């Protein structure tokens, strides 16, 4: 699986919250196995929009879309509980 480079605003979001190390660890797991248990990858509701997420840590999730079969773009990283 290939993840496109993050947009500058997402990099800034990670830096501000000191999540870079956690994010890149999870990104590595995702690239190796999208179904790795610690990622908790899921299709979000409403399902017809085809937005997916994986866990960065207990509080934050990365929202992504499939561009091609093996390429994804992370479109947001947000607080899972808001």
Image: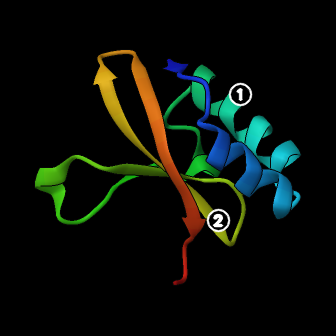
Determine the residue located farthest toward the left in the rendered image. Answer: 48
Disc 1 residue crowd, few under 14, some 14–19, many 20+, Cα 10 Å: some
Which numbered disc, 2 or 1, marks the residue that appears first in the sequence?
1
**20 w.r.t. 78: above or below:** above
Please tell me the numbered disc located at residue 74. none
Q: How far is mark 2 from mark 1, CA to CA? A: 16 Å
The local secondary structure at tag 2 comes to strand
Please tell me the numbered disc located at residue 28. 1
Q: Residue at x 39, y 15 (%)?
A: 70
Q: Is residue 51 left or right of residue 41?
A: left
The quarter of the displayed image where residue 32 is located: top right
Percent position of residue 46, x then y: 17, 64
Please tell me the numbered disc located at residue 60. 2
Q: Is residue 8 left or right of residue 64?
A: right
Determine the residue located farthest toward the bottom in the rendered image. Answer: 82
**51 w.r.t. 69: above or below:** below
Mark toward the viewer: 2 or 1: 2
Q: How many marks?
A: 2
């Amino acid at each position: 699986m290939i993840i496109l480079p993050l947009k500058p605003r997402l990099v800034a979001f990670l830096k501000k919250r000191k999540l870079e190390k956690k994010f890149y660890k999870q990104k590595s797991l995702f690239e190796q196995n999208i179904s790795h248990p610690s990622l908790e990858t899921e299709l979000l509701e409403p399902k017809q929009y085809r937005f997916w997420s994986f866990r960065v840590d207990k509080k934050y999730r990365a929202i992504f879309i499939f561009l091609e079969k093996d390429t994804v773009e992370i479109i947001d990283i947000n607080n899972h509980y808001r």
